[in-house]
Amino acid sequence: MARERGAANDNYRNLPAPVAEAGKSLLLLPRRITASRRRLPDFLIIGGQRCGTTSLYRYLITHPAVAGSYPGKGVHYFDSHPERSLAWYRAHFPVDRGTGPVTGEGSPYYIFHPLVARRVATALPDVRVIAMLRDPVERAYSHYQQEYARGFEDCKTFEEAVDREPERLAGEHDRLVADPTYASYAHRHHSYLARGEYLGQLVEWHRHLPRDQVLVVHAERFFADPQSVMADVHGFLGLERVPVADARAHNARAYSGMLPATRERLIRHFEEPNRWLYEYLGSDLGWSRLPPVAV
């Protein structure tokens, strides 16, 4: 194959973490030899989780001028493996031949981890960043369904997980900031509501990178009209706008609907954070609202 696309070996995601890490390390061994000649990424898809990042990445790497990371979408260098060398990170990307292809990765914990924006700005000051934002009510429920299905969540109901979230996340953000070697299971896997409070996350990224290097994608628009959004993404990355040949959704999950009382509870929870976000972006994204009260 002339150029590595990086999407064919994602099955390791379903293996136990130690097995997956060992497998990826073996795959990278021969590439480490040529790491000094490999490109650093031109773009990062930073999240949010369950916002369509897998589909966007898969569509993007079908572009003839784009090559993905190896062996799969998410390298997680800046969140899970910051102690590793830049040479290790380079091993995930194509050899630099002077011109193209554009390359990058998608790690959806990047937007939420409090130290990643600073690390990215230091290592990749010119990188283009794509942030995908989805209605936080829907995102939270989808996130729970994924974590439960993958064995990362032991709460039998979404409602229990939401109730337990404050105690699980208590102090975790501060521990991550204070200790760069600390990894928080709860912060990564049980942050159902916290991840949907997007404003603080975007502000942190804008503190470290110019705003014109950060593209905010409205996930619902992406789901409804992927061709139009991908044209915007291609333009943002300086690529020719090429239609996506197969715009099927990737990594989608089927599950039962949310309880109406829970939905109302979450709509109320996110009402003010959403309003602040809309003001910051200068755009009303039209996410979940309660019907007006009749008086």
Image: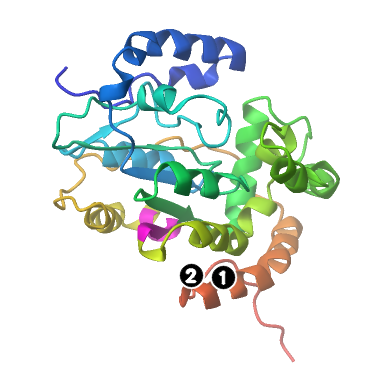
Residue nearer the viewer, 62 or 172: 172
Among the 4 quarters of the image, the one containing residue 198: bottom right
User: In front: mark 2 or mark 1?
Assistant: 1
Say whether residue 204 is visible: yes
Q: Give the residue at mark 2.
A: 285
Q: Give the residue at mark 1.
A: 277
Q: Quadrant of the C terminus?
A: bottom right
Residue 204 on the magenta span = no
Say whether residue 52 is visible: no
Residue 215 on the magenta span = yes
Q: Which stretch did the figure color magenta?
A: 213-222
State whether residue 204 is above or below residue 187.
below
Q: CA distance from mark 2 to mark 1?
A: 9 Å
State whether residue 43 is above or below residue 276.
above
Q: Quadrant of the N terminus?
A: top left
Q: Amino acid at mark 1?
A: Leu
Secondary structure of the residue carrying numbered label 2: loop
Q: Amino acid at mark 2?
A: Leu
Residue shown at the point (63%, 51%) measured from the top left: 195
Q: Which mark is residue 242?
A: none
Residue 128 x, y percent position in the rendering:
35, 51
Among the 4 quarters of the image, the one containing residue 178: top right
Answer yes or no: do the residues labelled 2 and 1 have beta carbons within 8 Å? yes
Image colouring: rainbow
Residue shown at the point (32%, 20%) measured from the top left: 35
Residue 14 x, y percent position in the rendering:
53, 19
State whether residue 249 is above or below residue 237.
above
Secondary structure of the residue carrying numbered label 1: helix
